[in-house]
Amino acid sequence: MAKEKSAIFIIFGGSGDLAHRKLYPSLFRLYKSGFLKDHFAVIGTARRPWSDDYFRETVVTSLKDYFDDSEEVMTEFAKHFFYQSHDVNDSEHYIALKNLASKLDDQFEAGHNRVYYMAIAPRFFGTVAEHINSEGLKASGYNRLVIEKPFGRDLDSACELNGNISKAFPENDIYRIDHYLGKEMIQDIPNIRKNNPKLEQALNNKYVSNIQITLAESLGVEDRGGYYETAGVLRDMVQNHIMQIIGAVASDEPESEDADVIHKNKTELFSSLKELSPEEVDQAFVRGQYDTDNLGDLKAYRQEDNVAEDSNIETFVAGKIEFDTDRWRNVPFYVRSGKRMPKKSSRIDIVLNDQVKELGIRPNSVVTLLIERENGHSILINGVNYKEAGQDFIKFPEEAEFDKAREAYESLIIDILSGNRVHFTLWDELRSTWKYIDTIRQRWDSQTPEFPNYLSGSMGPDASEMLLERDGNSWVWDD
Ligand SMILES: NC(=O)c1ccc[n+]([C@@H]2O[C@H](COP(=O)([O-])OP(=O)(O)OC[C@H]3O[C@@H](n4cnc5c(N)ncnc54)[C@H](OP(=O)(O)O)[C@@H]3O)[C@@H](O)[C@H]2O)c1
């Protein structure tokens, strides 16, 4: 049985895309499952002068894209929604927000808890956090600040952003969302490790040949060319999602389930990232940008809307990451992410060596954790569903339980309401990962790439294959 939570949500950017496509549907799921019931309200804020009624209509309209519940249920849910027109730079507006929040707190008996959700551009995060503090919006229960990536675009800007928000909120009240940490498989990795002692025993440089992480997309940048021009796949996928996935697979097993202990182990892993010299970047990382496909039907990246004709932004990256720890020294973590690859696939391939026979595992076995299930499967051993693989070193809850998996945002919002910080990114982790990524970015920015260098629908530039071949390895996933 879901335990009902109480809070007032203040959503900055309440009229935007993220709010309508992700947050409101997730809140609705929580409403249907009973986590949210009577004691909550949502204040949407943005500059446009909407009324409460109009705002509720937009919420119901968005829900209809995802749910087939009756309009009556959706309308009942939307009665918890209120709109306050607000410009983030105007101090007066925060007073109006504060008054509305405390009125709704009384009306819905919301326990004086506040969730401040930044569904706005990152350049506003600091301003909003400072005003929440200076205009006295914080209530007597908990006050939790939720921010979305990107957390800066390099170490300096991340430090500046963090400096601004941490003046107003202690680290313990800051929930930095990386939605990959809300995905069921990523959340299950600690359980898989704990419940499969042979696998856990094998997770080190004695038994692992290499670990591969692939986050491949078949689509191009679609209508997000403007954003992508400021980011590129290194910043958009590697600094955050890929690093956090490595954290889940390779951090030491925590002695307890306490969030601080789990984060301590992850922080230690990231602080041992083996630094690269500029010349080593050329050896260890490959970048690419998509061209049209082999029929010439699809747009090349440089032809996309809001993209410069001579853009040097990368849409593909492959790299070899290493850690300087006793456990992982000399084990390459090959990572890869790209747009316009043959199909969407998000997977972790753990390639074991021949020594694993000591543990009763067939030599050179590959354990694949599928982050999004493919053909109903979640874990493969040598490409076959683990249940049919004829090796029993992996046991996992029944697939049926998987079917009930929560959508990532839904699961993360429950964590925020419960004060569970396990699945969020901490500042110390960000600092180490940005430092590592900055070295690559700076090297790339000092050289002009020969773009475009891979066809849409291909596995990326040839250099991606060569990166592994040089070490006598190859990508497990090759479509
Ligand atoms: N969309 C996604 O799937 C997604 C995924 C991951 C992360 N994010 C991050 O989430 C954030 C929001 O993205 P989005 O795609 O939802 O953007 P969006 O659709 O452009 O929404 C931005 C929101 O901010 C409001 N806003 C803009 N200027 C304002 C101001 N001066 N004062 C008050 N409100 C203002 C806008 O409303 P008005 O114009 O009415 O003010 C709108 O509600 C960004 O940080 C983005 O990087 C988004």
Image (spheres, helix red, strand yellow):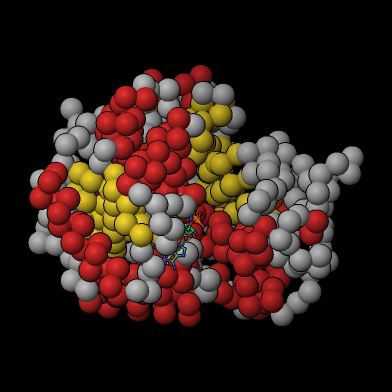
Residue 24 in the image, given as x and y percentages of width and height:
38, 42
State the residue in front, 432 or 325.
432
Query: Is any part of residue 162 visible from this angle?
Result: no
How many numbered circles does the render carry? 0
* Extreme residue toward the right, this view: 295
Above or below residue 192? Residue 118 is below
Q: Which residue appears at 36% of the width and 59% of the height?
A: 85
Residue 45 occupies which quadrant of the picture? bottom left
Placement of the C terminus among the 4 image quadrants = top right
In the picture, measured across the screen, residue 438 lies left or right of residue 189, that is: right
Residue 454 in the image, given as x and y percentages of width and height:
80, 52
In the picture, measured across the screen, residue 188 lies left or right of residue 470, that is: left
Residue 13 in the image, given as x and y percentages of width and height:
41, 57
State the residue in front, 336 or 54.
54
Residue 409 in the image, given as x and y percentages of width and height:
38, 44
Q: Which residue appears at 45% of the width and 30% of the height?
A: 64
State the residue in front, 373 or 136.
136
Residue 395 occupies which quadrant of the picture? top left
Query: Is any part of residue 52 visible from this angle?
Result: yes
In the picture, measured across the screen, residue 223 lies left or right of residue 50, that is: right
Residue 351 occupies which quadrant of the picture? top right
Q: Which residue appears at 10% of the width and 61% of the height?
A: 140
In the picture, measured across the screen, residue 381 lies left or right of residue 192, that is: right
Above or below residue 433? Residue 207 is above
Q: Which residue appears at 49% of the width and 39% of the height?
A: 371
Placement of the N terminus among the 4 image quadrants = top left
